[in-house]
Image (cartoon, helix red, strand yellow):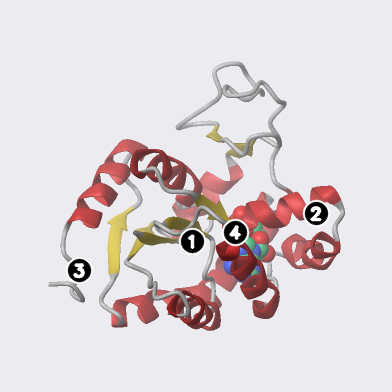
Amino acid sequence: MIIVMLGPPGAGKGTQCDLLSEKLGLPHVATGDLLREAIARGTPLGQLAQPFIDRGELVPDEVMIRIIDEWLEKPGHETGFILDGFPRTVSQARALDQSLARTGQKVDHVLYLRVPVEELLERIAERFVCPNCGATYHQRTSPPQTGGHCDVCGSTLYQRADDRRDVAERRMAVYSAQTAPVIDYYQHHGILREIDGEQSVSDVFDAELAALLAPTVENS
Ligand code: AMP
């Protein structure tokens, strides 16, 4: 089963991918995490990506497509996987379809987490992440148990530089212009499932599981 998780910045894609990955026993990859790791290691990819991320803009399609192709070629993805943060443009969506077609695969389900922009900017302003294990916390809805430290591994939490209000607003505009068309792309293919992302984490998760079990237009 190949699942794409779509949604604007701050909609909860990372949290939901972690839950789905555990429940379904599928590997998942977040392209934002891959880029942040590359930046932390100072690799050529990290140096290329950093200015785009700092400005809240998208890293060029050809770079992202190469990254995802390399990830797909690694062993362990034969029975399925979950993508978080990819595709973010229609070109990336088309390239993904082409890459999967080479091995007789296709995207089976696209889960689209819908959350209004104002709510998102608030969520992003309150988001803290663990630099070590990637766990995400929110001051209001899911604070860490020991203030400022990760419940999972104890590392000191930080706010992503691109979660600052000005960059977050830019990311939202980029999302509307470049990523929202991907929703139409998958809708057209009959595999998009819209999920109300304003519900609690567990209700969103239940809605996703129900959506994965229901037949898609393509399959019905
Ligand atoms: P995220 O962690 O998903 O919010 O991604 C953080 C940043 O990484 C984004 O604002 C983009 O600059 C970059 N990025 C992540 N995934 C992609 C992608 N598929 N295409 C282009 N840029 C990406």
Look at mark 2 in the image and give the residue it sits on: 39
Foreground residue, 209 or 13? 209
Q: Is residue 28 left or right of residue 164?
A: left
Find residue 55 and report its image quarter. Answer: bottom right
Q: Around disc 2, counting alpha carbons within 10 Å, would you say few (fewer than 14), some (14 to 19), or many (20 or more)?
A: some
> Residue 87, how many percent across, how many down?
52, 70
Contact check, label 2 and label 3, Cβ < 8 Å: no
Find residue 188 and report its image quarter. Answer: bottom left
Q: CA distance from mark 1 to mark 2?
A: 23 Å
- Nearer the N terminus, badge 4 or badge 1? 1
Look at mark 1 in the image and give the residue it sits on: 8
Check disc 3 and give the amino acid type.
Thr
From this view, report whether residue 142 is shown above or below residue 4: above
Q: Around disc 4, counting alpha carbons within 10 Å, would you say few (fewer than 14), some (14 to 19), or many (20 or more)?
A: few
Question: Is the C terminus in the top left, top right, bottom left or bottom right quadrant?
Answer: bottom left
Look at mark 4 in the image and give the residue it sits on: 74
